[in-house]
Image (cartoon, rainbow, N blue to C red):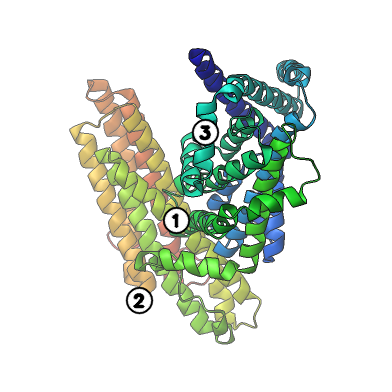
Amino acid sequence: MVKDMIFCIVGGLGLFLFGMRIMSNGLKEVAGQKLKDVLGALTKHRAIAVLIGALVTCLIQSSSATTVMTVGFVNAGLLTLKQALCVVLGANVGTTFTAWLVSAFGLGGLKITTYALPAIGIGFLLQFVGKTQKVKSLGSILLGFGLLFVGIGFMKDAFAPLKDSLGTQNALIWLGQNPILAILAGTALTMLLQSSSASIMIIQVLAFQGAFGTDWDLALRVAIPFILGDNIGTTITAQLAAIRTSRNSKRAAMGHTIFNIIGVLYMLPLVWMGVFGKAVSFISPWELSQGTIMAELALAHSLFNVTNAIVFTVAIKWLEAIVMKILPVTKKELAERPVVLEKHLFNTPLIALEQTKREIIRMIAGARGAVQQAIEGLVESDTRKLDKAMVAEDIIDAFQLDITSYLVALSREQLSDEVSNELPVLLHTVNDLERAGDHAVNIVEIAQRKIGQRMSFSGSALEEAAQLKKEIDQMFGFVKEALEHNSDEAARKALINENNLNRMQLGFRRNHVQRMSEGDCTPEAGLIFCDLVDNVEKIGDHLTNIAQAIIGGLQWTGVEPKMPPGAAN
């Protein structure tokens, strides 16, 4: 009996989670890019952000997916912290739809296999014979829907003996009558399963099968604290998603945790006194019974999340302030964003342009760091340095977005000829630096391939890689000096570096062929080395564009700058 129960619980839960994933993926594929576009184009109105968060979660059947997506948008700078918090509030409301879907089983006295098995068969058929992605996605939705309900059916059968187990009933009732313990149990269950939908479904099925007793009023009251705990446990997904993202993304995830915890805390006295349970019964259109207990719990889940969303939508500034208090702005974070691009300087365009140059100089330093870390990570097979290079690239992208937006806004003002001519050159400079960052990412990717395949460079290749790193690093330094001090001399020195890089590319490729023919390196390692050489040379090309622009006085004259003395042809 116990073995059968365990097998049914494990299998049923697995089918439920698997069905949820398949259905969620199918829904996301049907909705396509539009969902991301809707989230990314949020207005500043908090109520609309909450509604969109709820709608998207209803459509894709995953609050975790919506929350993780939102954290990603914050990380990319597409959403502010306040907007993200509003979206996640809405996601909490949208996730209650799953509980209502599950409760349909109890309300209609539905026999699971009546619709679940045909849905699985039709869904699989559409996936198998469908000629378009939309048909296949529709098949995924039906297949996931069917598996989800088959999983619930197994869980129902697994929990059926509990209605006759007084010991289990007394234990669950005792736990539910101690709300703090029940909340902790619900939190732990959701953190373990990584799905609030699954943990709430378990509570619903337990209640339906009489595990909380057949006094349905009592069963409702003692099951509600578990539901509240589930809402805290579900925030762990966003926290995990934010581990390796920007600090602002961590704030969005932290906000998700904070408003659920605060919501549970202010609801706890109402739950303890039985007021919350009475409110659910008062709102409910059903007579409380075995057939409606699952719907009553879904209603309790919705009531908590809707109330919490309303409270924090009104108090969103306080929530943002609490989050900022816990995760304040750091010096490092300040260094990751442009800080002197002030729009009030538009009245003095020359000063605005000078401030832009200051930020471009910081951007050069960021690109230089990304390239250094990428090359060192490749040569040393050091994943930590590769991670630092990727972080630096994200910062470069943020600088490009902010500086470009600032210059475009400045271009709409009344400008002198000097400023009008410099502005497009600075835009191209920013784009060249961003492209240099992209090549750093290319180096990271080939480094990951090298590490994954456990390849190593020969001694000669390591020496040549060190020469490349030294040359490109020196070139970055000259370009930075040239822009900072408006120095033609430094810019011409950068052109010498570029010429050296071109000669290195040709020479190192010949050396590579020689090493392969002598058996000093493998073809795979050789290809990776050649990719490194090519990417560094292309970074040099982008820095050359900047150096030539500086020599031209940041004006497009159409005249090629002369090569400096000592540069080879």
Task: Say whether residue 321 is left or right of residue 386.
Answer: right
The residue type indicated by label 3 comes to Asn
Residue furthest left as drawn:
459
Q: Depth-wise, is mark 3 or mark 2 nearer the camera?
A: 3
Which of 247/552 is in front?
Answer: 247
Q: Secondary structure at mark 1?
A: loop
Image location of residue 33, percent across then percent down:
68, 43
Q: Which residue is identified by label 3?
A: 170
Q: Quadrant of residue 477?
A: bottom left
Kindly identify the residue that appears in the image at 72 percent across and 60 percent down: 48
Q: Secondary structure at mark 2?
A: helix
Q: Residues within 10 Å of mark 3 (few under 14, many from 20)?
A: some
Image location of residue 271, percent across then percent down:
59, 53
Residue 311 visible within the image: yes
The residue type indicated by label 1 comes to Ser
Q: Is residue 261 above or below residue 551?
A: above
Image location of residue 563, percent across then percent down:
37, 61
On residue 227, the disc is none
The residue type indicated by label 2 comes to His
